[in-house]
Image (tube, rainbow, N blue to C red):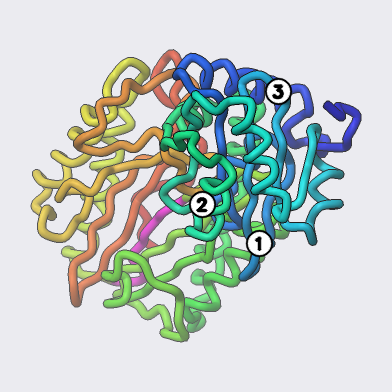
Amino acid sequence: MNISAPVTTDEGIGVEEFLQRIETTRRAVEQRGLTGLVAFGDCWRSANISYFTDFRPLDGVSDVANAVLLLPVDREPVLFVSDQCLAYAASVTAFEVRGLSALGTGMRDFARRHSMGPVGLAGEAYIPASVLSRIRDGLDEAVLQPTSVLAEIKAIKSEAEVRLMRKAASLTDAAMGAIRDSLADGEPHTERELALLADRAMLAGGADRTAFDSMVQAGPRSAYNLARPTDRLVRPGDLVMTDIGARYRGYVADGGRGFTYGDVTEDKVAIVRAAAQAVEAGLAFARPGIAANELNAVIQEALVESGYQRYSSEARGHGTGHGTGMDPEEEAPWIGPTNRTILKEGMVFTLKATITVPNVGGLRTERIVHLTPAGVETLDRFPMELHW
């Protein structure tokens, strides 16, 4: 491996950790009875690739947006990227990099050595059909089977990863502070203006970029579960939903908050309170050794008992949290009613409660949780019950 390659910044993940991840994953793949792992990532969901290299695919409508990692159990990995990104990827990767034009050849070479064994696939939920067909054609008769092995490994964060996520969370907190301070001037502000202020605050604090498109929804629009900001003014009496997050050195924060603005009716105050109390119940219960569905049940039951079951997707069984790290939403752990995964020390995930009442308003309250031996560390610190 080219371990002298400049694959990290001073604050990012070091080359030694990247190499250790490769070895850990290789052992786990072999223990599953697989001959290798094919991992797919793109410019929106890069974690399956960025777990092993500083390379992150770029947005585009061709192969520019995609990357594939091939990790045999008996050889070094190979990263396949757009031919246009080959030099860039090689400059930040500690192992061989080839163009995606060579993907079929690479898979055929691998299949000739491992014709009798199954090959694991990470990222099967979102790999494009065009890329998948090239992989399958190259593997010929070798069985390609989806596997959760990489998702399970990524779910346990190292000290370095948690440090970067803690910084991303602090930048997200600063963005909420920028929204609060802007509204304090009493002047009219639009949803779009507040979202831009949040983005600027994160970038000014050192964020690489936003983790996703920032959402600010005011008044009746806050009752939409997910929506982009518009030119609607935030008005006194509004309930406002925000969902914003920073990306810092490849790691993200996924932060949801809501707040009332000015004098509001009690029903809007009650929505803010109910969502915060549901998340607080989850924080008090969360610890290593419990099952994901047990933690989900605590938050779900709190929402049901608050009387908002009809207006909360989490109360109706959608799930009350998800893994997070290099992507805002990672596959593991999913905090949902059917997931019996045992939560482990080092996992990082969100706990959330969404309430959306048509013609009244809504919010999503979300905390980023790091499991420790004593219970939880919340990586974001901004208060959850907000009335401005």
* Residue linked to disc 3: 75
Quadrant in the picture for the C terminus: bottom left
Q: Which residue is mark 2?
A: 132
Query: Which dot, 1 or 3, sits closer to the camera?
Result: 3
Q: Calculate the distance from the C-alpha at mark 1 to the C-alpha at mark 3.
A: 25 Å
- Which quadrant holds the N terminus? top right
Going from N to C along the chain, the mark reached first, 1 or 3, is 1
Instruction: Give the magenta-colored segment's residue range.
Output: 255-263
Residue 255 screen position, x and y as percent = 46, 51
Spatial CA distance of label 3 from label 2 is 22 Å
User: Badge 3: how crowded within 10 Å, few (<14), some, or many (20+)?
Assistant: few
Instruction: List the residue tagged with mark 1.
Output: 63
Q: Amino acid at mark 2?
A: Leu
User: Which element type, helix, strand or loop, lies under badge 1?
Assistant: helix
User: Of 49 and 164, which appears nearest the observer?
Assistant: 49
Instruction: Between residue 342 and residue 169, name the one nearer to us.
Output: 342
